[in-house]
Image (spheres, helix red, strand yellow):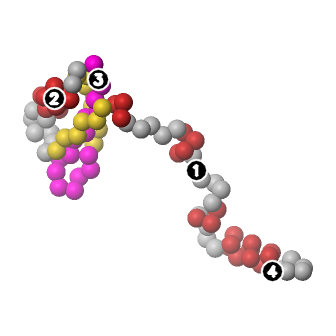
Amino acid sequence: MKTYEVFLRKGGKEPFEHAGSLDAPDDELALLLAREAYVRRGEGEEMWLVERAHVLVAQPELLAVNADKPHRHNNGSVVAARRKARREVPGQ
């Protein structure tokens, strides 16, 4: 058995949203089961099924705040102070 993640989109410019998971022996049966379980009342106009083994999961370290790039989040005073300090260094 394979586990599939089901994503639905209601239409228009709406984003796909995770609707749930299901287990099925193959892709064809997964589509049928997903249709019966998640869209039989018209809950979505489009459906994606993704085999869970193909889902990439980011490690927490990758999602941590990127503190080594202070130039991306400042009001200009940090950069100005750094430039001023470099100008005041003798011999440069």
Q: Residues within 10 Å of mark 3 (few under 14, many from 20)?
A: few
**Crowd band around label 1 with a 10 angstrom C-alpha radius: few (<14), some (14–19), many (20+):** few
The amino acid type of the residue labelled 3 equals Lys
Q: Secondary structure at mark 4?
A: helix
Magenta region, residue range: 1-16
* Amino acid type at mark 1: Val
Quarter of the image holding residue 8? Answer: top left
Residue reaching furthest to the left: 41
Q: Earlier in the sequence, mark 1 or mark 4?
A: 1
Measuring 9% from the left and 35% from the top, which residue is drawn there? 41
The answer to which image quadrant residue 37 occupies is top left
Q: Is residue 3 left or right of residue 29?
A: right
- Give the residue pinned by disc 2: 28
N-terminal of the pair, mark 3 or mark 2, is 3
Q: Nearer the viewer, residue 23 or 80?
A: 23
Q: Which residue is rendered at x = 16% and y = 44% of the image?
A: 46
Frontmost of labels 1 and 2 is: 2
Residue topped by disc 1: 65
Q: Amino acid at mark 2?
A: Glu
Assign the C terminus to one quadrant of the image: bottom right
Q: Residue at x 22, y 20 (%)?
A: 25
The percent coordinates of residue 51 (x first, y second) are: 30, 32
> Mark on residue 87?
4
Q: Position of residue 88 (x, y in %)?
A: 84, 79
Residue 2 tag number: 3
Q: State which tag comes first along the sequence, 2 or 4.
A: 2
Residue 78 percent coordinates (x, y) = 69, 70
Whether residue 59 is visible to the viewer of this picture, yes or no, is yes
Q: Is residue 19 visible?
A: no
Mark 1 vs mark 4, CA separation in Å? 31 Å
Q: CA distance from mark 1 to mark 2?
A: 41 Å
Which circle's residue, 4 or 3, is located before the other in the chain?
3
